[in-house]
Image (cartoon, rainbow, N blue to C red):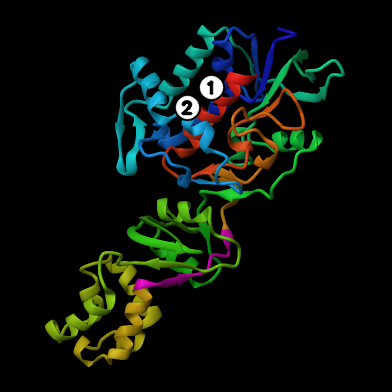
């Protein structure tokens, strides 16, 4: 395998899918990975159950500077085709909320399926392989110097992933290769990542750590209705993770703590119907007591022991405003250490949306997370990995 048709750098979801797709066309395929085993992020995903796709895949579920770029690949290889493969391999799965599909047993089943497909397609996988140099050959193709030998190939696929979760072997190597071959890179940042705080919200989060609240969170006109989870460092949970991909440093996020109710009407009605009750006891019917006490200390400490009938309407309306639009200003995020994805990356303007091949560098392909396509939480990033890997695998 010193001169395979295709070398794929990176043995994650996109790289393995590309490998067996190319191998099924009769090409000789070599996968090189720097870790001691391939598919580490697959194994840890979805709490070890792998949220491998979603029943509802649309281009609107993806962030990209060119929102049309992902359409071709997602149409060519859709979620139903992946589900068919999962069923063909006898993997039991179930649907959770929002169309998310998870393995019944273990993420190991998905990795085993991909490796089985690779084996059947004659793909060779080398782990613990460090890439030293990559160069375009004068006669076409590419030559690679690695810790496990030198290789020449006609097509080279970069499937190195992003910068998220460096303990899983993430690195910026794919971006370095893109720059080496003159491709434009868009500024990267951590996505699907918890928020951190340095103000009073940090202390509140520490006190409420472990509490989940059903909320609607918004920033820049984008909203998500999901759980918010308080942590020792700030806020996490699906709502916060989703919103983090749209948030920019310095921006304030808005949290509706009672998304199914009109807070103003609720409090004014209570003033009439529960005149002698304390506001905190009334709100504790809708929110956890601990959270209500923290909100009380922030927004109505003077009226903590006052019956609601004695609280001025203006104060109740101000409290209602905080319940509907609780303003939180994160100091930052937890960064790549815990981020599920890397936002931005290789500029899609320089890639063919049909083949994932560089327009200016024949035979060089980029797939998966290294590309400027980032999905929402819920199986969308895996579907992009399968679809982009498949697209490149057909044309390498």
Mark 2 lies on a secondary structure that is loop
Of 155 and 48, the residue lying toward us: 155
Location of residue 177 in the rendering, given as x and y in whole percent from the top left corner: 76, 33
For residue 361, say whether it is visible: yes
Q: What residue is drawn where x is 46% and y is 39%? A: 380
Q: What residue is drawn where x is 33% and y is 44%? A: 98
Location of residue 392 in the rendering, given as x and y in whole percent from the top left corner: 60, 24
As drawn, the label of residue 17 is: 1
Q: Quadrant of the C terminus?
A: top right
Q: Which residue is mark 2?
A: 77
Rendered position, 342 above or below 230: above
Magenta region, residue range: 324-332
Location of residue 374 in the rendering, given as x and y in whole percent from the top left corner: 54, 43
Residue 331's image quarter?
bottom right
Mark 1 lies on a secondary structure that is helix
Q: Quadrant of the N terminus?
A: top right
Comes first in the chain, label 1 or label 2: 1
Location of residue 193 in the rendering, given as x and y in whole percent from the top left corner: 52, 50
């Amino acid at each position: 395998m010193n001169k395979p048709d295709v070398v794929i750098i990176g043995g994650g979801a996109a790289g393995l899918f590309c490998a067996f797709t190319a191998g099924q066309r009769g090409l000789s395929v070599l996968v090189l990975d720097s870790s001691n085993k391939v598919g580490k992020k697959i194994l840890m995903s979805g709490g070890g159950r792998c949220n491998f796709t979603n029943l509802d895949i649309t281009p609107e579920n993806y962030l990209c500077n060119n929102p049309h770029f992902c359409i071709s690949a997602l149409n060519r290889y859709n979620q139903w085709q992946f589900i068919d493969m999962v069923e063909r391999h006898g993997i039991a799965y179930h649907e959770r909320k929002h169309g998310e599909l998870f393995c019944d047993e273990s993420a190991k089943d998905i990795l085993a399926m991909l490796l089985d497909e690779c084996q059947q397609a004659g793909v060779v996988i080398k782990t613990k392989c460090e890439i030293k140099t990559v160069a375009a050959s004068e006669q076409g193709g590419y030559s690679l110097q690695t810790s496990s030998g030198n290789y020449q190939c006609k097509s080279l696929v970069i499937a190195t992933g992003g910068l998220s979760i460096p303990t899983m072997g993430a690195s910026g190597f794919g971006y370095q290769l893109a720059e080496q071959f003159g491709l434009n890179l868009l500024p990267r940042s951590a996505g699907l990542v918890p928020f951190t705080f340095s103000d009073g919200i940090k202390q509140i989060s520490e006190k409420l750590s472990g509490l989940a609240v059903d909320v609607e969170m918004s920033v820049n006109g984008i909203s998500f209705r999901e759980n918010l989870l308080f942590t020792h460092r700030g806020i996490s949970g699906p709502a916060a993770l989703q919103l983090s991909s749209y948030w920019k440093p310095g921006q304030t996020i808005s949290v509706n703590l009672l998304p199914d109710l009109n807070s103003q009407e609720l409090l004014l009605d209570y003033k009439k119907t529960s005149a002698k009750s304390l506001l905190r006891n009334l709100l504790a019917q809708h929110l956890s007591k601990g959270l209500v006490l923290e909100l009380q200390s922030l927004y109505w400490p003077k009226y903590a022991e006052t019956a609601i009938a004695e609280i001025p309407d203006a104060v109740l309306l101000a409290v209602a405003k905080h319940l509907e639009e609780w303003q939180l200003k994160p100091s930052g995020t937890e960064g790549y250490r815990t981020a599920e994805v890397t936002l931005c990356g290789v500029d899609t303007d320089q890639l063919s949306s049909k083949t994932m091949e560089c327009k200016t560098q024949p035979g060089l392909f980029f797939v998966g997370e290294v590309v400027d396509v980032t999905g929402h939480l819920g199986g969308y990033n895996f579907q992009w990995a399968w679809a982009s890997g498949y697209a490149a695998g057909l044309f390498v």
